[in-house]
Image (cartoon, rainbow, N blue to C red):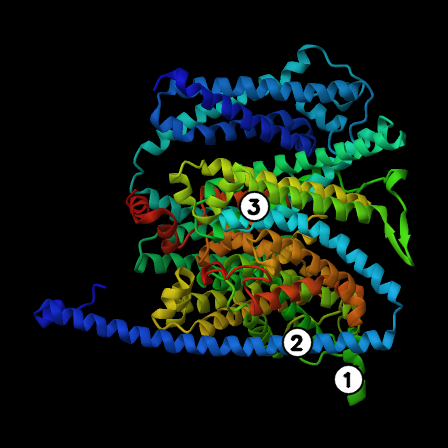
């Protein structure tokens, strides 16, 4: 194909890139990075162009690829320079854009130019300054083209067989780095040290998941798994309060995700109201451990002549009751929707989640309404208070281990195969003798049980719980994490929880952009890699065909 | 079936015999399972019937006990019709898209919201130009322009949505586009929040349409009347487009059988884009009207009305255009009369829609007006 024919692609990439950069400007991203904004925007441009040209680089000579990067850069750069220039001119002229576009403020626009805020606010830009964004995007785009070419070179070379050992060794190196960085004598950038360590911990856990997959099945995998588990068990004792608190919430979400994974990943029942079971678990534990904060419960207790100022049951005694209540909740909410499929199920379960939240908010006698239930008892063991972040993290790890083991065994059991069968084709499964009612209700009940226990631990961690803790976004988060990780894949759930619940804690500054980022990630994931980051083998084959999966295994 | 014992049994005939044995056995299993499923279905229906009876009984006792004046019910009915009109416009978008792609455009409520946002800025501009204080003719023209801009904003969003989030997934398993739609819905909501800020956008009604009039003792706000009449007019226009034009015929053909329609020379992609365009235009109009009626539009203004409108579309029989209108009016009335008739706090208003949705799906999955859908679709 001649270069002339390929040019429209460069134009398209330029326009798409302009769209993305303009969007990022409108949501105020450059202003967030202040002085380093030009650099960040150039990197973003490079990433967009590299991704867009990745497949081109496989088929065309470097000159063609660079030419397209150049065209994309010129078009995207010119357009963005015009847009930002118009904003700068308006702001310099004293026009307030903010009432319409909230984030178009002098600091945000000035960040594009890499200039101080005042220069834009007072309209003191030189003619050359207006060209800066264009040059920036052009350079970024060329770098992206180069990256695409480089990546092709890199992937074209066959990986040496020792690469496996690098993958396996990586988590241990990262763990070692976490340990070393934790020594008081080691200093690194002051306040940044804690965040860096947290990031390393998450990378280590994520790398561990890939290491387990890279190990040859058999003795090697067993040995690697045990070594990794030992490392994971040592983590709570190496981390400080904040890091433990973050990892605790990550693993509570892993517990919840493993439950949702059974409902959505195995049985294919898209449940958007999963937070209901999490809430049932949390509220059940709250009633059992802090009956005094529920008006109705304390009334009943005093009517029975029982003391109203102490927990009814301890954390451990509550677990079976919470599990049973959550399972009953699962069956109750599951029964009416047995006949629904796919989209309808999603909407109805979403409705259930909202109904439960409305009840929590409005049944003030029972739940104390928006004021919440307060002073829940922390878990204790032989008189020791296990309510601190480290022990909560340990409890979450133990809970995850138990749930992951149960889920792993269930997946390979008769009922697990029945779930997969109804996910693939309900009618065929029924014809083969799968009892749809029982199988679906089992999925709902088991999934709900896991979420209930996760909710109990969450409630014990939070001490005070409010209806707002159980909004639709908890359901969406849980769903997003199993999708990003890979539906139906247990390691995928852990990876998804780290990506979606853990990383935002590290990137505290961009918290505002969390939801947009996840939302965009969901769409992009569905288009580019619907099977998730760490998919189960079966899922990958379904979505990409067997030939593809075989090719990937062979490479 | 590869498990036939041809080799062992010698002749092909016997093999076939064996095969048919297995088939009849598995058919027997299937029928017995189906019978059980039928039994559970009847139990579910009985429960739903019981719920309905309880609801009716409760409504009668409450309305006897509370004895609201008749005018109260009449004004609630007016509210319900207005709400129903808005739901109907949005529900039509769900129904049109579902009829053609068999997918729920989960982000449709957000398309409506963006229509409302676009209309808000058009209104600001019109106010800045002083059109809203001019003679009545100018105000009406300006209002029509505002609504037009809202519709254009929504159309742009809807088409972009289809192009970016849905088209690449057209042949993917069913969960995949739904998840993409959920992502798109969140993305649109929070982008609006980030771009336009947290403060709600306040619609200022021009003097011409604020206030209202009385029929006997019942007060009817002008905005309510305008919403209802405009909804009916837009629905009529849609009906004409779908039933009487060439494009409408192509739409119906694609809905009936996409592959055959393509073979007959229909450009399927173009028709799908056109469908999103139509549905989004109606939603945009609904967004602007909702803005005038409620006075505010926020980033999440589209979410709950979107769910309600979807409920309405399902109630009327999804894929069925008159059904969506009927379902929306029923839902709007149920929602505005429901809380006082059942004597429950108004906060539980949202529950009514979801309970209705579940009841309809158990009782009449094909909806009030829908033709019997294949089980697959439900």
> Which callout, 3 or 2, points to the residue nearer the camera?
2
Q: Is residue A181 visible?
A: no
Residue located at (68% from left, 70% from top): A283
As drawn, A255 above or below A320 = above
The image position of residue A239, as x and y in percent, is 59, 54
The image position of residue A42, as x and y in percent, is 57, 25
Lower sequence index among marks 1 and 3? 3
- In space, the residues marked 3 and 2 are separated at their CA atoms by 53 Å
Q: Which residue is mark 1?
A: A301
- In space, the residues marked 2 and 1 are separated at their CA atoms by 32 Å
Residues tagged 1 and 3 counted as in contact (Cβ below 8 A): no
| Front-most of residues B190 and B362 | B362
Q: Is residue B240 left or right of residue A224?
A: right
Q: Is residue B123 visible?
A: yes
Identify the residue at the far left of this view.
Answer: B10
Q: Is residue A367 left or right of residue B375?
A: right
> Which callout, 1 or 3, points to the residue nearer the camera?
1
Q: Which residue is mark 2?
A: B51
| Front-most of residues A134 and B39 | B39
Secondary structure under tag 3 reads helix
Q: Is residue A143 left or right of residue A417?
A: right
Q: How many marks?
A: 3
């Amino acid at each position: 194909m001649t270069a002339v024919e390929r040019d429209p692609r460069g134009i398209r990439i330029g326009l798409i890139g302009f769209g993305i950069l303009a969007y990022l400007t409108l949501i105020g991203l450059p202003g967030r990075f202040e002085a380093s904004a030009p650099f960040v925007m150039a990197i973003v441009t490079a990433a967009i162009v590299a991704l867009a040209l990745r497949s081109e680089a496989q088929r065309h000579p470097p000159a063609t690829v660079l030419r397209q990067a150049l065209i994309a850069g010129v078009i995207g750069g010119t357009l963005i320079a015009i847009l930002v220039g118009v904003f700068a001119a308006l702001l310099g002229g004293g026009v307030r854009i903010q009432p319409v576009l909230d984030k178009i403020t002098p600091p945000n626009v000035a960040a594009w130019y890499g200039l101080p805020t005042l220069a834009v606010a007072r309209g003191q830009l030189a003619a050359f300054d207006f060209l800066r964004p264009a040059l920036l995007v052009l350079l970024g785009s060329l770098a992206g083209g180069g990256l695409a070419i480089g990546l092709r070179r890199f992937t074209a070379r066959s990986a040496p067989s020792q690469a496996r050992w690098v993958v396996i060794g990586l988590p241990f190196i990262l763990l070692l780095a976490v340990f070393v960085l934790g020594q008081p004598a080691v200093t690194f950038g002051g306040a940044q040290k804690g965040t860096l360590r947290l990031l390393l911990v998450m990378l280590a856990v994520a790398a561990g998941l890939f290491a387990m997959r890279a190990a040859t099945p058999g003795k090697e995998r067993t040995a690697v798994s045990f070594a990794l588990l030992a490392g994971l068990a040592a983590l709570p004792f190496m981390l400080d309060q904040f890091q433990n608190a973050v990892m605790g919430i990550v693993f509570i979400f892993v517990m919840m995700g493993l439950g949702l994974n059974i409902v959505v990943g195995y049985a294919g029942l898209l449940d958007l109201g999963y937070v209901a079971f999490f809430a049932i678990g949390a509220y059940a534990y709250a009633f059992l451990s802090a009956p005094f904060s529920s008006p109705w419960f304390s009334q009943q207790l005093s009517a029975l002549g029982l003391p109203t100022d102490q927990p009814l049951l301890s954390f451990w005694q509550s677990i079976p009751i919470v599990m049973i209540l959550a399972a009953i909740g699962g069956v109750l909410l599951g029964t009416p929707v047995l006949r629904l499929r796919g989209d309808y199920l999603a909407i109805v379960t979403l409705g259930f989640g909202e109904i439960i939240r409305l009840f929590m908010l409005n049944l003030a006698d029972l739940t104390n309404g928006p004021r919440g239930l307060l002073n829940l008892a922390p878990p204790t063991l032989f008189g020791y208070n296990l309510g601190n972040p480290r022990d909560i993290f340990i409890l979450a790890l133990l809970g995850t281990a138990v749930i992951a083991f149960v889920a792993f065994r269930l997946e390979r059991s008769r009922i697990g195969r029945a779930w997969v069968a109804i996910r693939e084709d309900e009618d065929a499964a029924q014809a083969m003798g799968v009892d749809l009612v029982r199988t679906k209700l089992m999925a709902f009940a088991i999934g709900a049980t896991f979420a209930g226990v996760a909710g109990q631990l969450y409630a014990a961690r939070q001490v005070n719980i409010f209806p707002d803790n159980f909004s639709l976004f908890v359901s969406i988060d849980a769903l997003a994490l199993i999708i990003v990780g890979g539906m139906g894949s247990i390691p995928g759930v852990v990876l998804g929880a780290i990506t979606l619940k853990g990383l935002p804690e590290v990137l505290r500054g961009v918290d505002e952009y969390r939801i947009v980022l996840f939302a965009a990630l969901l769409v992009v994931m569905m288009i580019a890699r619907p099977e998730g980051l760490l998919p189960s083998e079966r899922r990958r084959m379904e979505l990409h065909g067997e030939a593809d999966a075989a090719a990937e295994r062979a490479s | 079936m590869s498990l036939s014992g041809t080799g062992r049994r010698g002749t092909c005939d016997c093999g076939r015999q064996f095969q048919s044995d297995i088939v009849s056995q598995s058919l027997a299993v299937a029928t017995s399972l189906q019978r059980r499923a039928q039994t559970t279905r009847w139990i579910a229906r009985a429960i739903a019937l019981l719920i309905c009876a309880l609801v009716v009984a409760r409504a009668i006792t409450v309305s006897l006990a509370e004895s609201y004046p008749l005018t109260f019910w009449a004004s609630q009915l007016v509210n319900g019709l207005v709400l129903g009109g808005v739901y109907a416009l949005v529900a039509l978008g769900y129904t049109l898209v579902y009829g053609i792609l068999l997918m729920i455009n989960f982000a449709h409520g957000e398309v409506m919201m963006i229509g409302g946002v676009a209309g808000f800025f058009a209104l600001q501009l019109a106010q800045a130009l002083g059109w809203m204080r001019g003679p009545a003719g100018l105000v009406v023209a300006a209002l029509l322009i505002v609504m037009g801009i809202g519709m254009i904003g929504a159309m742009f969003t809807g088409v972009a949505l289809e192009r970016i989030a849905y088209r690449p997934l057209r042949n993917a398993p069913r969960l995949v586009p739904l998840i993409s739609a959920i992502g798109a819905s969140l993305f649109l909501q929070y982008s609006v929040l980030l771009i336009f800020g947290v403060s709600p956008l306040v619609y200022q009604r021009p003097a011409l349409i604020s206030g209202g009039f009385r029929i006997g003792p019942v007060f009817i706000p002008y905005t309510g009347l305008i919403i209802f009449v405009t909804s009916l007019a837009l629905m009529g226009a849609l009906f004409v487009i779908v039933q009487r034009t060439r494009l409408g015929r192509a739409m119906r053909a694609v809905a009936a059988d996409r592959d055959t329609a393509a073979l007959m020379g229909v450009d399927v992609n173009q028709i799908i884009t056109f469908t999103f365009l139509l549905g989004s235009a109606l939603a945009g109009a609904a967004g602007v009207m909702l803005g005038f009626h409620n006075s505010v539009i926020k980033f999440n203004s589209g979410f709950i009305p979107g769910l309600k409108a979807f409920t309405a579309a399902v109630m009327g029989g999804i894929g069925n255009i008159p059904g969506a209108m009927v379902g929306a009016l029923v839902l709007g009335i149920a929602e505005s009369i429901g809380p006082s008739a059942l004597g429950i706090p108004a906060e539980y208003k949202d529950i009514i829609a979801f309970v209705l949705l579940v009841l309809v799906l158990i009782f009449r999955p094909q909806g009030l007006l829908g033709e019997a859908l294949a089980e697959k679709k439900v």
